[in-house]
Image (cartoon, rainbow, N blue to C red):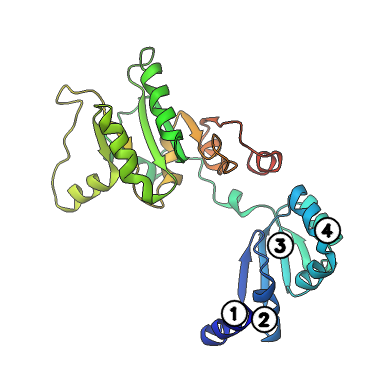
Amino acid sequence: FSWAVRAALKRVQPVAVVLVELELWPNFILTARRLGIPLALINGRMSEKSFRGYQRIRPLMKRLLDGFNVIAVQNEAYRDRLLALGGPENRIVTTGSIKFDHVETDRNNPKTNELRGSFQIRKGAPVFIAGSTQAPEEELALASWLEIRHQFPDLRLVLVPRHKERFDAVADMVRKRGLPLMRRSELLSAANASATPRDASAAGLPSPVLLLDTLGELSACWGLADVAFVGGSLTNRGGQNMIEPAGYGAAVLFGPKIGRASCRERV
């Protein structure tokens, strides 16, 4: 609602507002302009499907796009689509995707090495990571790992659910199969308490399933992967970012639920 947006902006009094990708909120943009707040759109994108939809409301789109001081887009195709919707030519620039700007390629970076040590993954051990997953992708990854271990007994499995609300559910799913489990959060707690985590392999037990149940560590964790399954691609989400595991040179797997635009942008 415009009155709520106006009240929020007057309370916060931002020096500038930067929106990301395709966050085009009409009341927010128009109210910010009325209040004289500079607006920028960065890492801008416009898929073919979105473009076809926005063409139906081109007059409104022209008004919204004209409200930006600068629009930085990922490629020329997106720039052409925004121009076709009435965007200001002198304020739309092609800068590339910021997802590429800081893609790590060194598997020996300090954060990845720390995760390797924390998870007790020996140097050279093959690793399969299923990351940014949704139900039932973890279950399918686990079943695949159990099957392929007949051929590759040293293969380690790391599960990384996309949403923290599902960390405990995924842990329960692993334990119900009678499999040992190592959770990153518990390893961190043990380290903070100066305790020594139990080494399953040293005790003669099967290598545990590894669960990365912390936030902000998946990017570094991909550096452990020899094979990386990118989640959201067996569900209707449309798939997640493939750039990070690809940057490390992992063999990237994904399901069929990847839109054509998503596949071009991410691969």
State which tag comes first along the sequence, 3 or 2.
2
Percent across and percent down for residue 224 are 41, 35
Give the mark toward the camera: 1 or 3. 1
Q: Is mark 3 on a helix, strand or loop?
A: strand
The residue wearing badge 1 is: 5
State which tag comes first along the sequence, 1 or 2.
1
The residue wearing badge 3 is: 72
Q: Which amino acid does label 3 sit on?
A: Ala
Res 235 → quadrant: top right
The residue wearing badge 4 is: 55
Q: Residue at x 33, y 42 (%)?
A: 169
Q: Residue at x 70, y 53 (%)?
A: 74
The residue wearing badge 2 is: 31
Q: Is mark 4 on a helix, strand or loop?
A: helix
Q: In which quarter of the image is the N terminus?
A: bottom right
Q: Which amino acid does label 4 sit on?
A: Gln
Q: What element carries label 1?
A: helix
State which tag comes first along the sequence, 1 or 4.
1
Q: Mark 2, residues whose alpha carbon is within 10 Å: few (<14), some, or many (≥20)?
A: some
Give the left or right position of residue 247, taking residue 124 as reference.
right
Give the left or right position of residue 95, taking residue 246 as reference.
right
**Structural distance between the alpha carbons of marks 1 and 3:** 24 Å
Look at the image and tell me whether residue 76 can be seen: no
Q: Quadrant of the C terminus?
A: top right
**Structural distance between the alpha carbons of marks 1 and 2:** 7 Å
Res 142 → quadrant: top left
Q: In this view, does 2 lie above or below 177?
A: below
Give the mark toward the camera: 3 or 2. 2
Percent across and percent down for residue 248 are 51, 36
